[in-house]
Amino acid sequence: MIYPVNFEQKIGFGQIREMLADACLSPLGRKFVQRVQFLDRFDLVQRLLQQADEFAQILRSGEDFPSSYYFDVTEHLNRAALEGAFLEVRGVYEIKMSLRAIRQALGFFVESEEGAFPALKALTKDVEVDRQLVAALEKLVDDSGNVKDDASPELQRVRRDLIGQQTQLRKQISSIMRHAKNEGWTPSDAEPTVRGGRLVIPVIAEYKRRIKGLIHDESATGQTVYLEPESVFELNNDIKDLENAYHRELIRLLTAVTNQVRHHLPELKRAYQFLALLDFIRAKAVLANRLGAVMPTLHKQPLIKWKGARHPILHLTLQAQGKKAVPLNLDLNPEQRILLISGPNAGGKSVAMKTVGLLQYMLQCGLLIPVAEGSEAGLFEDVFLDMGDEQSIENDLSTYSSHLQNMKQFLLFSGKKSLVLIDEFGTGTEPVLGGAIAESVLGQLHQQRVYGVITTHYTNLKNFAEHTSGIVNGAMRYNPAELQPLYQLEIGKPGSSFALEIARKIGLPKNIIEKAGTLVGKEKIRYDKLLEQLEQEKTDFERRNATVAKQERKLQKAVEEYTALKQHLEDSKQDIIRTAKGQAKLLLKDANQQIESTIEQIKRSQADKEQTKAARQQLDEFKEKLTPEPKPVIRRNGTVPTGPLQVGEKVTVEGQDSVGELLAIKGKTAEVSFGGLKTIVKLEKLERPDPNMVREKAKKDKETANAAPSRGLDVTQRMADFVHSLDVRGKYAEDALTTVMNFMDDAIMLGIPEVKIIHGRGSGVLKQMIRDYVRTLREVASVSDEHIERGGDGASVIVLK
């Protein structure tokens, strides 16, 4: 039993039904949406939920399941059932395409893994689509809904003749039109048109006698007549005959295929029932995925054990605003059957109660619900709702009278498998009497062992719940410091209405608030103060607990890192010791062999002076060989640089031999000086040079400095010998830069207007270095890439001033 009759409207299920209808692909599924109703059969609800859950899995996996051509062909099948009737081309097309969708769906389940989608596969039982029928439909119409020219030999012949005659007719009409236009008998922009199924030409009314023919129509003004020239009578007649022949052949083919459809009507109706169910279940799955809904573990007896439950409509509304709904954890079981929720206004009490009613109703209508994994749910036989203002002028009912009328129905018809939902229990009349009647009704409902969620502000109901087993208090959390609702449901304690605190925040005069406190009484004030204090302490405790938990996580992470590092060092230490021991054994073995060999050599030479000296020399050479060379010292303080690069160090570009000085580090880039030229390089491409490279560079610089002075220049000869293009590809960056500097000096000195330097693409370092240098020269007007056909950005064209 569902009470009242407008339960769906009050609880918000009407919007869920609308969203389901919108998710359907055709009227087939929408018919099932209208038939959705509350069910209390465990096996049926279980099957409906499993079907929706399996289809939601298919949609989430991205499987190629047919989602087009879900046509409602009921009208066409009813027409086909009439003896002597035939389907229209549109009907044949829609039946063909929808049967294709059915066949694809059946094929999907056949090809799926064994044991997958059992609830959906059960729907395919007794669903068959005759291949010959599909072949006949395929032969008659194409996938665009047009009749195929080769549907039959006769249709193909008639179609071919018809096209030929129409072509000939258009040619003759065009010829007549050209002549008429030249004579001025027809408007200059006139074109042939069709009247009464025959091709005609528009002629100015005063010249209608100039062309022999039959007038079929005239314009609204009477200034133009539509005339069929006499010379095309026969062609128009032939075309009309061919069109009639084409139509007769098409009707014959449509009648034949309709007879086949009529023969398979029983199995077709089962197939389309299957397609309608697929559309409906798919819509449920689409809505479930949109809501993040799942299938909870289902029980036959009444039970609500939900984790992270969300009101579906509120969830979608907040999601559209970029917000999240606060989830609720609910637990109603045989030991804790009724939840009494209290708390301030606008704190979320009614939403929590409506969430319970809507989700339970959705569940028993076969819809997945937005709760977290691991949730459990049972089935109820009845759901009773008392919410909102139901006063009626016609029935002479006040608001409170309507609430009492609902209470009467609850007491008469509810039982141990009923779910009772009451919003603002006891309101609408004098508070003391209203609270007393509400407590009495609550006691009776408790005796009838109903399940329920009830919201209230009455203290006597909170106290009753506190001292009655089977009824539990719940509070909507509230921040008393900021007087802001948290929309969190906490089960196990009552909530305060914070009436005086809210009044104080709004700004009511202090004397009014104090007077109200006096009228209420110290006991009530103390009770609310205690609840407020508990709420504040809980908020503070949760904040501190969150901080401690965060610190514990950091500490745990540090301990794990320390343990892992210690283990790594221990393992590395053992490996180093084992390696060192092995090397020491080999070294000792070699040393012993060398010493024994030296002694043996001295003995054989009978301590000959020269032989002994030679043996000692060999032993010293072996000793020097075993002694490792000292590592090259680069820094002035004698330490070898390690770790990140530092400003002032010598560096080289990865893959290059040029050595430069690191001037500055800016984020992921570095400024480096190569031979007085500053350039920007990615830090990751820099590395420390080999010590030998540094020594070689110093030696080379010294040699260059001590080189003999250059001879005088023969300017005329050098201008004649100067080559306007320089190729530095394959050279080291420093060498290339030296060559470029000399080349540019010559070009500037000789007054060359334009030169080209070929440096290649590579990593781009050489190109950047050269261009950075060239741009420092005052004599350079511009630097640009060469033409794409002559090297593009692999060469630089330099224009001199």
Image: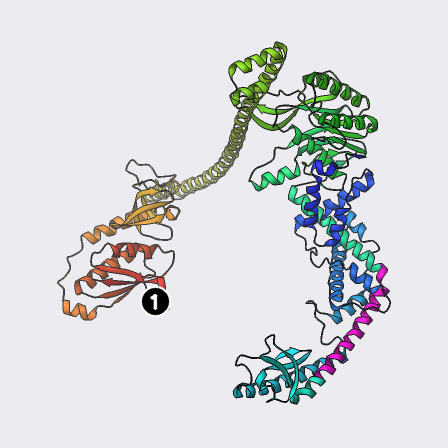
Residue 608 visible at all: no
Front position in the image: 106 or 714? 106
Residue 208 placement (x, y as % from top left): 60, 86
Residue 232 placement (x, y as % from top left): 66, 87
Span colored in magenta: 238-266
SS assignment at label 1? loop
Q: Residue at x 68, y 19 (%)?
A: 458
Q: What residue is pinned by disc 1?
A: 787
Residue 444 placement (x, y as % from top left): 80, 21
Q: Which amino acid does label 1 sit on?
A: His
Q: Which residue is drawn at 20% across and 66% down?
A: 752
The quadrant of the rendering that contains the C terminus is bottom left
Q: Main secondary structure of the magenta part?
A: helix
| Above or below 255: residue 177 | below
Front position in the image: 377 or 364? 364
Q: Residue at x 59, y 75 (%)?
A: 221
| Above or below 492: residue 209 | below
Front position in the image: 450 or 241? 241
Front position in the image: 686 or 483? 483
